[in-house]
Image (cartoon, rainbow, N blue to C red):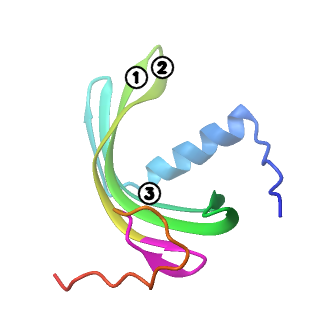
Amino acid sequence: MRCAPTRASFAQVRNHARAGLEVGRHIDLHGDTAAVELDQHWKRRQLKGGAVRIVDTRAQQRETWIREHDQWFLWRVDHVRPGEWRVDGKRIDPSKPYDPNALEYRPPPP
């Protein structure tokens, strides 16, 4: 199975990024620098373990943006806290290499 590439114009990508910023939990703006705490969710088809699979990942992270000449540029992503990761619907341990034969990951209770 081969995935067809998705084509998007620059404006579509820009609008998608702006929409993502609008759902940030907190924006800290200081002059030409903005930091936003985001809940990131990314679902995609990806080649993993020799096959194209549905990969669904979540994370919380801080993105820092800088403004230059009335345009905003992503400068840094940090404070990344991995959330739940799934491959073909099965939860995996994001700290280990992917093994299609591994049992479903069950994290220890907090």
Q: Please report the residue visible at 37 percent of the width from the left and 71 percent of the height from the top.
A: 93
In the current view of this chain or complex, which residue is farthest to the left?
A: 110
Q: CA distance from mark 3 to mark 2?
A: 21 Å
The region drawn magenta spans 85-94
Front position in the image: 47 or 78: 47
- Near mark 2 (Cα within 10 A), the count class, few <14, some 14-19 or many ≥20, is few
In the current view of this chain or complex, which residue is farthest to the top?
A: 69
State which quadrant residue 100 falls in. Answer: bottom right
Amino acid type of the residue that numbered disc 1 sits on in the rendered structure: Arg
Q: Please report the residue visible at 61 percent of the width from the left and 37 percent of the height from the top.
A: 14
- Near mark 1 (Cα within 10 A), the count class, few <14, some 14-19 or many ≥20, is some
Q: Position of residue 3 (x, y in %)?
A: 80, 57
- Quickly name the residue at label 1: 67
- Image quarter (top left, top right, bottom left or bottom right) of the N terminus: bottom right
Task: State if disc 1 and disc 3 touch (CB < 8 Å).
Answer: no
Mark 3 lies on a secondary structure that is loop
Q: CA distance from mark 1 to mark 2?
A: 6 Å
Q: Earlier along the polypeptide chain: callout 3 or callout 1?
A: 3
Main SS category, magenta section: strand
- Quickly name the residue at label 2: 70
